[in-house]
Each structure stands twice: as C-alpha cells, then as structure tokens.
Amino acid sequence: MNIDILITQVDEHNEFNILATKRFNPKKVIFIYKKEDESFLKSLKNYYTTYLPNTTLQELIVIEGDINGLRKIILDNKNKSLIVNLTGGSRINSLEMFNICKDNSIKAIYIDIKNKKLYLFDNKVEIIREEFEDLELDKIIKASGGEVINDSTELANKKDLILLTKAIYKNLEIWHKYKQKLYDSNIFIHYAEDSNVIKINLNLLSKDEKVILSKILIYLKRIGGIDYTTEEKEIKVYFKKEYLKSFIFKSGTWLEVATNNIINEIKEIDEVRSGVMFLWNDKSKIVRNELDVVAVKDSVAICISCKDSDKYNENSLNELDVYSNKIGGKNVYKILVATKDPIKTAVKYRAMEMGISLIIFDGNEEKFKIKIREAISKKK
C-alpha cells in the first residue's frame, strides 16, 4: 500500500505513531495536537529527525472536538494517497475522524500493539495480524520525551555475580534467616578511608553463623573476589572487585540480577535491562527515576520492581505505577517481584486493582518464567 500522507494525533506515548510510520512509510506525516501537548510534539519531532529523517513533518493544532478543523485537514488531503491513524490522542477527535473517513471513503487504521493487530477501516473492517517492527527501550522512552541516562545491566552478566545470585536463591531459607546480619554495622564494620576493606566482628556471631561465614569467605576467595586475614576476634576482608562488595551489601541487588537473567531466557522477550535510571520530559529534569528491571516485548515495556522481603506496601505499588506509566502508558506491563507475600493482605488486592502482577519468587526458575509469561500475556 503506497501512502503519501499519514494523519495522526500526538499523545504522551507515541509508539503507535512510530509503528504506523514504519509500517506504511508515508512521504509526509501530519501531526494533529492540542496546545497542552506541545512538549510531546517536540519530543516526537526530535525522534523523527533522528530516526526517520526522510519523512516530511507538518503539525496542525486542533482543539478537542473541533470537527470542522478535523474535517478540513482530512478533506484537504483527500485526493492524495491518504490514511488516518485513529490510535491514541483525544478519543473524541478519533471518533470524529472515524466518521469523517467513513463518510468520505478514506482509509483509517487502529493499532493494537499488545495483541499485534492492525485494524483497517475501508469499505469494511479488516483485522490484520501484524508483526510490527520492534522498538528498543531507548527509542520507546525517547519517543515520549524521556531519556535513559544509566543502567547496571552489565553487572547481571558478570559470572561471579551470577554464581552468587544462584547460590542465594537456591538457599533462600538460609538467606532470609541470616541476611539482616549483613546490615548490622556492629558486625560488618566499613572503613570510610578504604571502601574496599571491611572488618567482621566475630564476637557477635553464633557458632552456626561463623560456619556459614567461613564457607562464604572460602568460596569468595576461590573465585578471586576477595582476600582476608583471620584473627581471634575478627576477620579483615579485602575486596578485589568493588562491584562485588556493593552486590553483597546493597539490599535486593541479587534479586535484580536473578530477575534480569531469568527473564532474559524467555524467548518472547526482546530486551532486558536492570537498574534503569531515566529522566522525563517534565518542566524540570532534576528528578531521576529508577526501575529495578525493564524489559521489552514486541515494542511494549515491562516494568519490574524487585523486593527481597515482605515489607512492601501501597507506596511500593504507587511508585511502580507512576514510573511504569511514564515509560509505557496504558500498554505497559507492571510487575512486582518479591521473595515473600506482603505482610498486609490488602496489598495483593490493591495490586490487582492497579493492574500490577505480584509474583513471588521462591527460587524455582521454571515456575518464575511461567508466572512472567502469564503476566505479559494478560489482556487489558
């Protein structure tokens, strides 16, 4: 289908505009927008300039419900090879554009990204199964005015961290029994003058804890992560890799690594990143947002928060909801991965209300993959 002009609305999230442009390859795209959407229009134009530079752009401002304005834009281009995109933007304007197209035998489309369907409205409605071109996370965020500024995905690929992560989730009961000891500053003493050295006070550890500690230290030394010296009442540990110390003493990092790597094994997933830090197109770009894991499936973002505890609540859900909607809008998949059920039962019901899938990871990799697949297959 050769298309000269694509008419489409500007939205906060504009994946549908990009996919429609890539699908029909029009010579010109006419963006219809409202005054309050100028910042989204600017971001979208920047995207086209960078990634679709051969497409001519035109922008026309139309207030919501201005049927005469919409009719003029569409009918002025009627004699050209024209298609109108009904996806996104003002619902009222979309309905009015649909009626204008129907009355004037003009082709219109609606894109269902999640379900890989293209609805073509001509003399009849045709539903086309469509494999849209995949958009990477950077492009999804950039299209709506955001920017990925950093991520820690490379940590998830380090062999020593993978081994440690698996050791933790294969022994979750022991991990949860003793992990709080790691954050006791009277036991694990950190040196301000040398961040790669810690001292372990053996007086505050039980016999069983000392046995476990000894096994861990021997293992870490064997894989080249540390050296250590032992005295009667203390052990001094010298970390050879700074990231290894951060991994051990930063709560929940292992769960991010596990989630990243296990999801990366699911064939439906196109991209996975962890520790994603991004800025957004607000009045100020001072506030940094961060998500533990972000994946992409068929140009749809999957936003994941990781909690290695039962101490998460409505605030955790709200934060995930806000950040997810920033990245992916109404199409986004929202998942909270935890190692225990929440203390408050109400959190489960609130998660359901907010469209957040709550997945408890008990160390079983295959069961975790099944639950992730179920979460990203839900219809909305």
Image (cartoon, helix red, strand yellow):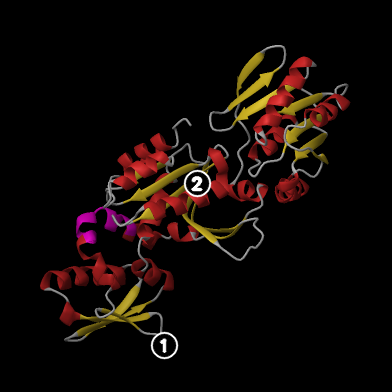
Residue 241 image offset from top left, x and y in percent? 41, 73
Which residue lies at the image location 65% right of the left edge and 31% below the top edge?
91
Which residue lies at the image location 64% right of the left edge and 48% below the top edge?
139
Which residue lies at the image location 78% right of the left edge and 19% below the top edge?
106
Q: What is the CA distance from the residue labelled 2 to the residue labelled 1?
A: 38 Å
Q: Is residue 119 above or below residue 150?
A: above
- The secondary element bearing badge 1 is classed as loop
Q: Residues within 10 Å of mark 1 (few under 14, many from 20)?
A: few
Residue occupying the far top of the picture: 123
Which residue range is magenta in the image?
A: 165-176
Q: Which residue is mark 2?
A: 295
Q: 379 or 264: which is nearer to us?
A: 379
Residue 166 image offset from top left, x and y in percent? 31, 55
Which residue lies at the image location 80% right of the left edge and 45% below the top edge?
53
Amino acid found under the numbered disc labelled 2: Ala
Residue 314 image offset from top left, x and y in percent? 38, 52
Q: Is residue 166 magenta?
A: yes
